[in-house]
Image: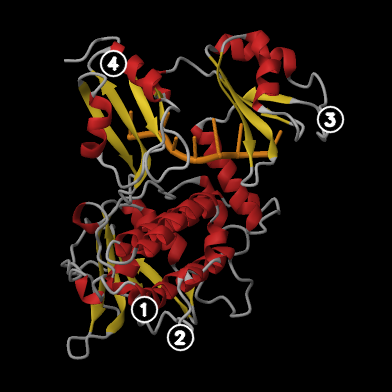
Amino acid sequence: MKEPDAIKLFIGQIPRNLEEKDLKPIFEQFGKIYELTVIKDKYTGMHKGCAFLTYCARESALKAQSALHEQKTLPGMNRPIQVKPADSESRGDRKLFVGMLGKQQTDEDVRKMFEPFGSIDECTVLRGPDGTSKGCAFVKFQTHAEAQAAINALHGSRTLPGASSSLVVKFADTEKERGLRRMQQVANQLGMFSPIALQFGAYSAYTQALMQQQAALVAAHSAYLSPMATMAAVQMQQMAAINPSALIATPITPITPSSGTSTPPTIAATPVSAIPATLGVNGYSPVPTQPAGQPASDALYTNGVHPYPAQSPAAPVDPLQQAYAGMQHYTAAYPAAYGLVSPAFPQQPAIIAQPPPQQQQQREGPEGCNIFIYHLPQEFTDAEILQMFLPFGNVISAKVFVDRATNQSKCFGFVSFDNPASAQAAIQAMNGFQIGMKRLKVQLKRPKDANRPY
DNA sequence: TAGTATT
């Protein structure tokens, strides 16, 4: 079916509305396709604007690459299509990050500097939106040895005009390192400069997981909304990936046409609970973050910011809670935006177009996996507590108890995980967590046959 | 001084 020396290609700069079936005709002309997969976000299913393509024959891949790479631009894109071997095809580490360039150096200048050390596959100076150099570049050699030779010869070898220190030449960050860098940026933006704050590994992970979930929520919801709302969701996801604090500080209102509505959104007025749980199987989306038992998780609550119900109201505010409050504001703003966006797009179905929220029956997890949550905000529904507890593991059930007569929340609920460690992590992190004027009470659910102490 | 994306 596929030649043993077939090459997997990475295809970049694909419009997000193109799926496999749309892309197939573009690539089929170079040979029989073995596999073509659009890359989607693991959690949100959102099209990432790129794909993997493997032809049965190696030759087809080479033909496609030379015919298409940087040769044409797909509709709606402002950069040409990328067709090149996927990272997984490359041998070893051969990509360099070059820092402390002068602002004047162009791609060509950098290329000249590096070409004595080997064959360069790619050389790009990073530039801001206005075209000014960011003073750094990526240079990819064909082999690891060439890249290493360039480091040996060039790193620290000179100081370029306009640069504040000597030239930096090193291997570009791996994916993992990039993640760390992002977390550090997040920490910095939230003002967490102290050595104690630097231990907040769990905080970053938690925040990022929550941001992902929030973005997913809006993404799911926006399927029923306007293109503008969808764009906002995309932007939001991008921001969540790099800068949760920007997300918090940037409510969705800027995308809404101003139409005289001045009611400030509040979570009580318009809960997001109507958002269908369309995230993954059974409406539940697993999150990899498992703070359970991790040292960072312990550090989070041994540094004087332990959230606890008995804590004085004047206690210092946990930045985690601030972040959470910010997100509430964000999600609360969303329905308000909906109300404003909708009339501008009369062809869009109104809110009745939403499928009915999936009413999941409460499911019990194994002993030790079920938690009880009390003091929930009145407007929290299954969807909200699901969102709140997803970062701690695989949630198999999330249920807010509702008064049958009034359909009002009784302000308590149950969440079940598929393992006890997740339940413990959730209790550790969320018991005493302040939301508005309330602090959550989070504890293991009593076994059915337990003696009732009161 | 870290890109437009890499299962």
Picture quarter with the N terminus of chain A: top left
Give the SS element for disc 1: helix
- Please say if A135 is above or below A119: below
A132 in relation to A364, above or below: above
Sequence-earlier tag: 4 or 1: 4
Binning the other alpha carbons within 10 Å of mark 1 as few (below 14), some (14 to 19) or many (20 upward) gives some
* Residue found 40% across the figure and 46% down from its top: A76
**Mark 4 and mark 1 on one chain:** yes
Q: Are marks 1 and 3 in contact (CB under 8 Å)?
A: no
Of the residues shown, which amino acid type is indicated by label 1? Gly
Vertical arrangement, residue A322 with respect to residue A20, above or below: below
Identify the mark at residue A38; answer none if there is no mark. none
Residue kind at label 4, given as amino acid type:
Ser
Q: Mark 4–mark 2 contact, CB under 8 Å? A: no
User: Mark on residue A161?
Assistant: 3
Q: Amino acid at mark 3?
A: Pro
Q: Quadrant of residue A370?
A: bottom left
